[in-house]
Image (cartoon, coloured by chain):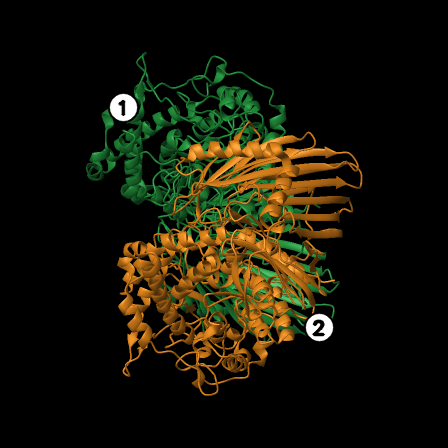
Chain colours: A green, B orange
Amino acid sequence: MENISGSGWILQENSFNPAALGKCEAIMCGGNGYMGLRAATEERYIGERRGLFVAGTFNRFLSDTEKDNEVSELPNAADFLEMEIKLDGQLFSLAQGTVKEYIRSLHFATGELKRQMHWVSPAGKEYRLDFHRVVSLGDLHTVAQKVCIQPLSGVAEITLSTGINAQMTNSGAQHFAEGPKRFYDRRYMQLVQTTTQSGIDFVLTTDVTLSREANTRIAMDRRRIFSVYDISLEPEEVLTIEKITTVHTSRDKKTEGLDTAALQAHALAHLKAQSALGYGEIARQSAEAWHQKVWGNIPVTLESTDPTDLLALRFAQYHLQIMAPAHDNRMNIGAKGLSGEGYKGHTFWDTEIFVLPYYIFTQPETALSLEEYRYLSLPGARKKAEGNGFSGAQFPWESAWLDDGEVTPLYGAADIVTGLPTPILTGLIEIHITCDVCYGVWQYYTATGDADFMARCGYELVFETANFWVSRLEPGPEGKLHINNVIGPDEYKDQIDDDAFTNHFARWNLWLAMAYRDALARENPALLEKLRPYVRYGAWEEKARDIYIPEPREDGIIPQNRTFLTLKEIDLTKYKNQTQVGSIYRDYNHEQIGEMQVIKQADVLLLILLKEEHFTPEVKRANWDYYEPRTLHDSSLSLSTHCILAADMGDEVLAYDLFKRACNIDMGPNMKSSDDGIHAGSIGGIWQCAVLGFGGLRLVGDKIRLAPALPKAWTRLQFYCWLKGQKIKINITHDTVQVENLTRTAPVEMEINGTTHVVADMLEIK
Amino acid sequence: MENISGSGWILQENSFNPAALGKCEAIMCGGNGYMGLRAATEERYIGERRGLFVAGTFNRFLSDTEKDNEVSELPNAADFLEMEIKLDGQLFSLAQGTVKEYIRSLHFATGELKRQMHWVSPAGKEYRLDFHRVVSLGDLHTVAQKVCIQPLSGVAEITLSTGINAQMTNSGAQHFAEGPKRFYDRRYMQLVQTTTQSGIDFVLTTDVTLSREANTRIAMDRRRIFSVYDISLEPEEVLTIEKITTVHTSRDKKTEGLDTAALQAHALAHLKAQSALGYGEIARQSAEAWHQKVWGNIPVTLESTDPTDLLALRFAQYHLQIMAPAHDNRMNIGAKGLSGEGYKGHTFWDTEIFVLPYYIFTQPETALSLEEYRYLSLPGARKKAEGNGFSGAQFPWESAWLDDGEVTPLYGAADIVTGLPTPILTGLIEIHITCDVCYGVWQYYTATGDADFMARCGYELVFETANFWVSRLEPGPEGKLHINNVIGPDEYKDQIDDDAFTNHFARWNLWLAMAYRDALARENPALLEKLRPYVRYGAWEEKARDIYIPEPREDGIIPQNRTFLTLKEIDLTKYKNQTQVGSIYRDYNHEQIGEMQVIKQADVLLLILLKEEHFTPEVKRANWDYYEPRTLHDSSLSLSTHCILAADMGDEVLAYDLFKRACNIDMGPNMKSSDDGIHAGSIGGIWQCAVLGFGGLRLVGDKIRLAPALPKAWTRLQFYCWLKGQKIKINITHDTVQVENLTRTAPVEMEINGTTHVVADMLEIK
């Protein structure tokens, strides 16, 4: 049995492995969209990376020096999970003594994390310890812990030390000033910490209750408040510890405007109410919320010869649920969700291309919130465009709080040639993010038909992104318009010209603006009049006509950019077989890699996937054959794209293999790759492989298409999706496709296996 | 054998004990006055507290919120000690596997720290590991490490990961912005970090060399630069790793004015030169410096039935040497030296009363530097006085960088009654620090006769402190002048009036100003003329005459303050027998303790010790009998005072017992009391017990007095002291006192056992 395994509803770790601490913290992360809580253990270990992240609470590390490389990031808030447990004088730690039994399990059905163990201390005394924890999906502010300790070798003296510890940092960057801390009634502990630059108050309040009388001491330290409990237990007596904690911040919409003291009072009252419920009831309410929101509502289910396939889908839905700040449209999804420090909580194109489809199809209200975030970011995007001498809206490559603007760091890992940090240019020139945002609007509207959103936000986003391209195009000597000096999806190529992906999408952005404007002229002239300041129809038309588009060569190959096909080729076998991504950087620096035909992730192939109506099957195949062997999949965003394309091309064996590899990015055996957090885009990709790939649900042109292609291992795939305001149940076997409109308030037009159908109620296609 | 023991030149830990990590880090701390490096291990453990502190590099944690409780403190700089060592795939850690042999030893003679062990991995493979380390006393910027690894179970694959890690904080407070980091020649690693508010650049540069070819990778992370080495070893082959590191800052006087890039270049060149020397030569040069500065120059030696007595003296001299920033008169000594975060690197009265005598008598040039620090702080002290509506100079209770002013934090530990942090009033009203500074000047001048210092600094310090008292005294209704609302040395009493210690010393401060002014009028009228702006003779005279002095009652008891003798008494047995200081705070809060006759530390008794000429032997005895039983010795500054007084009163059994207890404050069995750093004042106290107490060397009035009183266990005590510019060797047995003037350029007048002698060369008294 692998150390990390699972089936049904449970992902589990089968033995304690210090090397897997970071991985389990991330893949077993708890959360509810408001906060993400890494699955750090109650006891501490070297190598752990405790983390509590509250969506949208960005802060920039403060210093008076102007030389730093800091950008706004999601701060790592105080830790309250820690419990220092002394059993008969011995600090409890699985790194010492003997672990007789051990299972750590994440229960997707309820969101609970459990650890059950039988531990023999170095002195030979035996204990049973059970740890339970849930980040409530029923109450976004609440985390509940329950610990049961049973001595198996006679009486036991137990000392528990626990509280709230605000000494946590983001890899050393401290984002908080220490605020007030205090006890109430010698029982409730409360600690306030305030972000240093953005001034957001965090109020953490906690209550510890024990099943037995304890001798209790209260204590404070710098950035810490805690209590120490001494308890004597009879042989085999079970001590139950419940710790209920609430998290509030001054950024919370519900309590906006409260000053620190009022927020403290609110938090205390809320804690008292939650603590009165107790662990069991909090866990029950959370499980109920999971059922209502996900498992009893929009589950993906499948029958496969390999039960881990279904587990992977549940893993994906679990994480897609906990990473999305659906409660607040001023927030978006980070590239690592809320599961780690990686990418600083920033939002990338990952949202629009890799995770948005999930929400559009299953939780359109969450998708709407994510789209509204982009709309609320428009002022900043206009400012960025203006600052760079352009018109319209230029979206930041990395995005944090609404008015933070571009937050991409300027330097990365060591350059092995120069010995200096490698400059990061994505924030300056990876400009396809702007058409990706437009693509997000298009996807959302095409699937939902949400005219209200379009009127409030959508048209303006499409027009203003088009206006950016109008100003960004540069005339070449031959009369065509070019987009020079960019980075495409393949970030191994810096400062390139006429990137196929970017140019294609820029033209499409212009086209979409024209199409929407035409439709408005027909259907809603009053709204068009309101949007007039953003409408530059003549310019869109002219630029779309004159833009240079890298067309397929005679052999069908689309040049990834102006020079790519002329670059030298090297034997990539070593790197294709790598166990860790990015291994090529151990042999070459970024500049050298830029001069070879080696690709980080799907680039031309992603273009072909997203805009398939523009390319023939022959072009698709030729580019697949050319580019895949040159692609190292050094981005977690690469495999799912290749999986779906392989399914499209009928290579179901390869597609299934790529699906497995995509699932393994986080769930697989690599112990280190998820330390910084899960890969949100890749997790969206798992769902995409199943539903968009094997299920074949796709938006093409203006149509909704369904063209399933199940892998052999799967005998049934069933999922739910919202289309044009109707909830549709889709059930696929190798022989039939059942499509049922559950809402039935309006028929939905779909192309199913090449034929157009109107789904008004139940439909079965053989 | 105790787990921490020692004899001769070596203090050692006999088995690995995770509970003693912090203690050993502090008591085995390395340093050279420029920097202090806690004795953290190469491998990491839960509970460790790594720390590198460079004298005088104060910074205030930066935040935009005005609500924080931050003050300027000595920042914890980047760690370079860490070596992650994998032995055949297993992370080396003594918390796992079996430790067959283990000794950690600090060698006072050379300043080297060694760890030698035989380790069996959880997989049963055996290794011998030797760790050596020295913070060079020969080159203040250099730290050298040497590690030898020998596999005893066949061939071995070793992976070493090491570099510079700037993720360190002060209990969560990050004082540094991340600066440039880079490799040179794929070999030398350099990292710059800049304090966030004071803008001090730290440049750390390191070089790792191996005795065998390795496969090397270079790497960077946030706030980290490191290299990874893979090495294959033959059976029993010894791998030797040398790591040489240099530390420079933009506060260094020698390189003042260099910009960051120039300082980086300087640091690299310096590192290369040091690294070329290698571990052995660096250690040799350091040992030579230890010999020249301490052990071959000013050693205290003694013959005792208990060899740990001599060890304690060496322990004291070792720490007194490494804690003193003798190289820079803009810096002083922190209450924890440079050995931990405790007291934030701040300077207290501990300098003048508890450690200054050591330097005055053994290293007068260091004493001079410490005195000059106070002189350079005069502008700030004048500002503090002015800000509080007083004249003259009011010194801050806690002092950091010269212009930081008062840096005492405003809140401390939890109040068990209110649940809130306890307010700290010492920075506001513990005003006796101002006469303590004056006392330091007087001690220095009386022992050294350094007229140059007095002309440049000393008189001004004495006059301006006197002027503070002139303005601080308040008339009472009966016509006397009072000092109300203060804290005396006994900090368990807040906001009290007419504190005996403060009032006595204030009067003496005025008297001393008058005496110095009179002497100047006689001997140096020109200088007096220059100092005229500070001379307020009439006021001094008047105030000294009218100040209320708490005189002894009929029974000889001096009231500690106006109300002390009226406070209620409780049974203190429980707290007198405590194993940890401050245990009374678990039962009472600060306000309640303020209402009882319970004392933290020597108060009236300290007054009697420091100003013994003002009190009769009967008064001394009466106050001893009254106050000692009411004193909890909850300050590390208490025991040595009581020891010396006991010696004075002829109770040599008690004196010797108190000496032992004073030594145990850091060297003793309490595993937690030194976690935050050693107790500088207490360590000064160990030396004071021996030399001032049992040796009987004292400054009384204007005289130098020698009145030895060896405890029974000691058959010989020998030490060196500088008096009036002459180096004097003093050799004491129970029968004889030998005093030799080694310098012999001037005779020194001393009162020896009640008779005045002039020591011109060699003198022996039976």
Which of the 4 quarters of the picture holds residue B70?
A: bottom left
**Side of A755 relative to A452 (left or right):** right
* Label 2–label 1 contact, CB within 8 A: no
Specify few, some or many for label 2: CA neighbours under 10 Å numbering under 14, 14-19, or 20 or more. some
Q: Nearer the viewer, residue A335 or B491?
A: B491
Q: Residue at x 54, y 39 (%)?
A: B246
Q: Secondary structure at mark 2?
A: loop
Residue B37: x, y in percent? 56, 49
Relative to B471, say whether B719 is above or below: above
Q: Position of residue B656 (x, y in %)?
A: 64, 70
| Residue A57 % position (x, y) | 39, 51
Q: Which quadrant of the rendered structure holds the C terminus of chain A? A: top right
Marks 2 and 1, Cα distance to the nearest angstrom? 83 Å
Amino acid type indicated by mark 2:
Val
Chain assignment, label 2: A
Confirm whether residue A286 shows in the render. Answer: no
Q: How many C-alpha atoms fall within 10 Å of the one at disc 1: few (<14), some, or many (≥20)?
A: some
- Residue at image mark 2: A155
- The image position of residue B739, as x and y in percent, is 60, 60
The residue that label 1 is drawn on is: A541
Residue A416 shows which numbered tag? Answer: none
**Hey, which quadrant is residue B375 in on the image?**
bottom left
| Sequence-earlier tag: 2 or 1 | 2
Q: Secondary structure at mark 1?
A: helix
Question: What chain does badge 1 belong to?
Answer: A
Judge whether B500 appears above or below A371 on screen. below
